[in-house]
Amino acid sequence: MLGLLLIPLCLLRYSQGVDRMMAKVQRGPQALALHDRLALYGLNGAMGIAGGLLGAPEASMETLLLMVPSSGERHWESQRFPLCGPKVRAAVAREQQLAQAGAHSFAPRTLQWAVMEEGSSTRVGLAMNPMALQTSRAGPILELQSTVQVDYTAHYSMPLAQLGPVNLRVEQGLFHALEELGWLHPYALHYQADVGIEEPLPGSCEAWSVQLVDALMSG
């Protein structure tokens, strides 16, 4: 019971801490104290782990890999993700139709997702927003490369919830400061897949947590 009573206080302290650290970041990333940097670094890891537990393994891995130095480029082969997202699947289906009609080249596309976009895949949107799609043709095969820049934006606040006086949000500027300090390591992630011009595309995928919420709201 005591723990339940302390939850609002903890949330309020978190909100106040965000504002305090953002004020420091506005003076420059170096203004963040060591304990602030450690807290944000740990929070990035916690968000990555939470994403995996909630059914978004791709976004989870992308977030955790920010903590690992790299060349700035990573390549993953996947025949399902992100093609299982309705928006991506629709774009590739159009290119399949163009290829069937004789097209051999395709203009690059950029796909974006709005927060909680209806009729789309939250799982894909979390991992791929915004996504660059580049397609080339090799005979009856479409070679697909889906690219996302995995980094934090300097001036963006992602709202999570409003709990009375407490505004829960993710201030990406705090984590962007860690990137500038060399604690986190941005990179470009390329998903690669080969799809036949008449091959059926993967079915929809969604995080189990989103499916559960949708089922509860509809039932």
Image (spheres, rainbow, N blue to C red):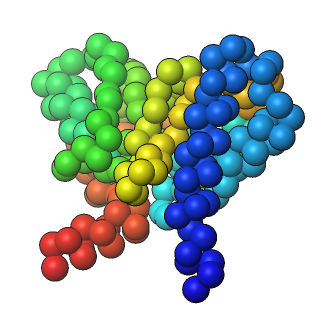
The total of numbered circles placed on residues is 0
The answer to whether 147 is drawn above or below residue 78 in the figure is above
> Horizontally, is 36 left or right of 91 in the view?
right
Which quarter of the picture shows residue 189? top right
Q: Residue at x 19, y 50 (%)?
A: 119
At horizontal 62% and vertical 81% (from top left) the residue drawn is 2
x%, y% of residue 161?
39, 52
Relative depth, front residue between 11 and 192: 11
Q: Residue furthest bottom?
A: 1
Nearer the observer, 54 or 27: 27
Q: Residue furthest right?
A: 34
In the figure, is residue 28 to the left or right of 200? right
Q: Which quarter of the rendered picture does the N terminus lie within? A: bottom right
At x 61%, y 28%, the residue is: 22
Between 216 and 150, the one nearer to me in the picture = 216
Q: Position of residue 51 (x, y in %)?
A: 54, 56
Q: Percent from the top left, x then y, of residue 136?
A: 38, 21
**In the rendered image, which quarter contains the C terminus?**
bottom left
- Taking the image as drawn, is residue 216 in sight? yes
User: Is residue 112 left or right of 8 when viewed as pictured?
Assistant: left
Residue 87, relative to residue 185: is it above or below? below
The image shows residue 12 at horizontal and vertical percentages of 55, 53
Residue in the foreground of this view, choosing between 64 and 178: 178
Q: Is residue 192 visible?
A: no
Quadrant in the picture for residue 91? top left
Residue at 36 percent across and 33 percent down: it is 141
